[in-house]
Image (cartoon, rainbow, N blue to C red):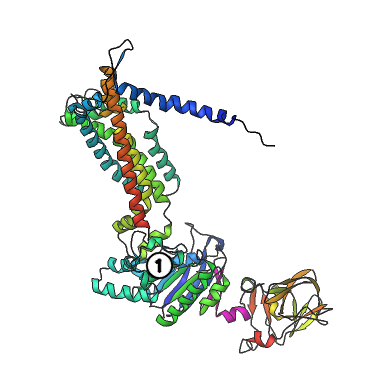
């Protein structure tokens, strides 16, 4: 296992990139801490698979370096990096049995037969496929095949990192949870560095210790699931994570208050801004309906079971609010207010930290609810 | 109310007529000839299974069959590996992939007798590029006189004409393998040979079965190319089953024996192809099943 360092890394598929738009992956510096589980989250085409392939060595970056524990591996071929990768499409060697599949990477590395046998038996237990070891791999279900691909990576004791490229895409929904839970258990028990690419926020938030959100070739925020929810560093994170995403209001800041649609809203802190476009972001969970605050009009109520999503119109802009179960829309709700601490300020789409720092102890979701 | 009539029969009639005239009647004519003897004048005498018996004891037929089996085995042994090799080295995408595909398809578009003619001229010692060059290099090469020269030319000609078919089918098989397989193999440190053995070959098996079957049937029936090139010679060196059959039927006008010969020929191809197909699909099940 290893710490993976990305040093001024960037990649362009073009021969002579000119502008930032030519880069599929814009310049990035980051340390992937040894033994942590990361999720790379972003919409299709945001550069997350490019980044993963650079780490695994399937792609050589056009700029910058990749280091494993301080050793430069930028130009090393995949096989020499000692990483494992699970792909979107399950890859097994059809003509082999499960056992032979698991032994394959070890055989290719010339390990003695008895050691191969021990390790395959151990990995068979880890991925819970002991009983299927002598079956042909080709007749198995997609989730079993994904477990074999994973096992082929874990069978190498010294594997530097396990990489996952949207591994649950072709798995039946009821197996997704099980497989993801199993992954988490494996991570807890064996402590591999894991990097998991997905465009599904639920997958990312439930799997990872830290989520890396990518947008348009750029890493916009790296944080715990909680941080991404409470303090989205970029309006894209606010929009992409959460269901529905964060509401954004055009605003002006005056001292410790904001003016939204002509109404003054107290923010509780000063925000150092430098004259860019200002927006206030509030998650639907933190919008309260009542008789005071910003004028709003309810346009629609969607019942999604656990809670209701209330669609409102604030000064011509659509706004969503979440009303908990049994907590219907109050009669005569003509205004909205923001729950304390649920407000983030953005300048040119990037979050502005209030003077004096963020309020400690993040979990305002609970005291807001 | 539902009316019933027999008009629907008229709809299948064209097909019935077509199949009757294109397959059933000609085949039955052959069957008819195979059990009778004729001395012309449309006079026929019942011969029973005599012709079949004759043919089974005919050294000539066994020799032709032997040559045929050797020929088919050799061209399969060359064309299948060579086709796979070519397919593996063809570019996977881009302009060059299209260029290669067109080039590969070209030999398949040339009519059989033209292929024969091309090689007949190409191999001539006096005016042909190949024959002249070999002769100038001091190689004793003359396909009209030398046994080995004739065989070599017929085989090279068939390889030239038909390897493309195997290559194109194998190429289609290779193209259907997702990139992830190759990437996983890299990560598993698989050798080039392992990639071929455990990824490419299993994925190509279906198309290769078809390629082998097609090439076997076709090579077993080969007629035009060697007929144009060598006429079956020198001596009987390249007289394959079809050439022999035509000599017997049209050259000597031995219709009865030739008919019996044809039927046995037909059966041999069918049986071999059937057995081959069954073996390959069973192998598939064994490898693919639980």
- Could one spot residue A78 in this view of the protein? yes
Give residue B161's position: percent from left, percent from top: 33, 34
Give residue B83's position: percent from left, percent from top: 32, 43
Image height check: is A235 above or below A226?
above
Towards the viewer: B118 or B139: B118
Q: Is residue A114 magenta?
A: no
Tell whether A37 sits left or right of A286: left
Give residue A242's position: percent from left, percent from top: 63, 74
Tell whether A185 sits left or right of B194: right
Q: Residue at x 69, y 79 (%)?
A: A285
Towards the viewer: B258 or A247: B258
Q: Residue at x 31, y 29 (%)?
A: B263
Answer few, some or many: residues within 10 Å of disc 1's Cα (few below 14, many 20 plus, some between 14 and 19).
Answer: many
The N terminus of chain A lies in quadrant: bottom left
The C terminus of chain A lies in quadrant: bottom right
Give residue A203's position: percent from left, percent from top: 54, 73
Mark 1: which secondary structure? helix
Image height check: is B262 above or below A1?
above
* Parent chain of label 1: A
Q: Residue at x 26, y 26 (%)?
A: B49
State which quadrant residue B209 falls in. Answer: top left
Residue at image mark 1: A149
Report the magenta residues as a range: A211-230
Towards the viewer: A196 or B216: B216
Image height check: is A143 above or below A257?
above
State which quadrant residue B219 falls in. Answer: top left
């Amino acid at each position: 296992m290893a710490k993976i360092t990305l040093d001024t890394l960037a990649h362009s598929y073009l021969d002579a990139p000119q502008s930032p738009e030519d880069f599929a992956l814009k310049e990035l510096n980051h340390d992937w801490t040894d033994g942590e589980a990361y999720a790379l989250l972003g919409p299709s085409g945001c550069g997350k698979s490019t980044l993963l392939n650079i780490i695994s060595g399937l792609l050589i970056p056009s700029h910058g370096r990749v280091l494993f524990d301080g050793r430069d591996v930028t130009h090393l071929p995949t096989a020499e990096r000692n990483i494992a990768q699970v792909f979107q499409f399950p890859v097994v060697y059809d003509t082999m049995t499960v056992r032979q599949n698991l032994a394959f990477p070890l055989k290719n590395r010339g390990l003695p037969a008895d050691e191969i046998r021990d390790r395959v038996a151990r990995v068979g237990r880890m991925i819970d496929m002991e009983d299927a070891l002598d079956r042909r791999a080709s007749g198995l279900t997609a989730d079993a095949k994904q477990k074999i691909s994973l096992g082929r990576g874990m069978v190498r004791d010294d594997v530097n990192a396990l990489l996952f490229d949207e591994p649950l895409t072709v798995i039946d929904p009821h197996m997704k949870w099980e497989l993801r839970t199993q992954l988490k258990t494996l991570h807890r028990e064996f402590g591999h560095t894991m990097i998991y690419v997905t465009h599904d926020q639920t997958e990312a938030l439930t799997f990872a210790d830290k989520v890396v959100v990518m947008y348009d070739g750029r890493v916009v925020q790296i944080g715990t699931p909680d941080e991404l929810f409470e303090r989205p560093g970029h309006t894209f994170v606010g929009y992409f994570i959460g269901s529905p995403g964060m509401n954004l209001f055009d605003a002006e800041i005056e001292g410790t208050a904001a003016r939204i649609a002509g109404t003054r809203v107290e923010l509780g802190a000063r925000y150092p801004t430098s004259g860019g476009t200002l927006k206030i972001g509030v998650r639907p969970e933190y919008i309260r309906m009542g008789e005071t605050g910003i004028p709003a009009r309810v346009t629609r109520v969607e019942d999604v079971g656990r809670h209701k999503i209330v669609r409102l119109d604030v000064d011509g802009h659509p706004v969503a609010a979440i009303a908990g179960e049994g907590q219907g829309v109050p009669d005569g709700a003509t205004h909205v207010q923001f729950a304390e601490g649920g407000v983030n300020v953005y300048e040119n789409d990037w979050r502005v930290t209030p003077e004096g720092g963020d309020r400690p102890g993040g979990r305002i979701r609970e005291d807001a609810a | 109310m539902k009316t019933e009539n027999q008009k629907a029969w008229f709809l299948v009639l064209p097909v019935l007529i077509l199949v009757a005239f294109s397959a059933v009647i000609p085949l039955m004519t052959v069957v008819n000839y195979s059990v009778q003897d004729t001395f012309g004048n449309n006079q026929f005498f019942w011969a029973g299974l005599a012709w079949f018996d004759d043919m089974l004891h005919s050294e000539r037929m066994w020799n032709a069959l032997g040559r045929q089996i050797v020929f088919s085995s050799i061209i399969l042994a060359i064309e299948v590996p060579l086709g796979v090799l070519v397919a593996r080295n063809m570019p996977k995408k881009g302009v060059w992939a299209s260029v290669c595909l067109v080039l590969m398809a070209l030999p398949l578009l040339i009519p059989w007798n033209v292929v024969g003619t091309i090689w007949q001229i190409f191999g001539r010692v006096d005016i042909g590029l190949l024959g002249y060059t070999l002769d100038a290099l001091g190689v004793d090469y003359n396909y009209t006189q030398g046994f080995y020269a004739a065989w070599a030319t017929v085989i090279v000609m068939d390889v030239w004409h038909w390897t493309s078919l195997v290559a194109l089918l194998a190429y289609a098989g290779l193209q259907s393998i997702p990139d992830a397989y190759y990437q996983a193999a890299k990560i598993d440190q698989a050798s080039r040979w392992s990639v071929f053995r455990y990824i490419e070959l299993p994925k190509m098996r279906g198309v290769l079965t078809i390629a082998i079957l097609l090439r076997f049937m076709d090579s077993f029936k080969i007629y035009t190319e060697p007929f144009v090139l060598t006429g079956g010679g020198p001596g009987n060196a390249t007289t394959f089953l079809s050439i022999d059959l035509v000599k017997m039927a049209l050259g000597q006008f031995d219709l009865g024996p030739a008919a019996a010969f044809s039927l046995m020929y037909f059966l041999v191809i069918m049986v071999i192809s059937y057995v081959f197909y069954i073996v390959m699909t069973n192998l598939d099940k064994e490898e693919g099943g639980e």
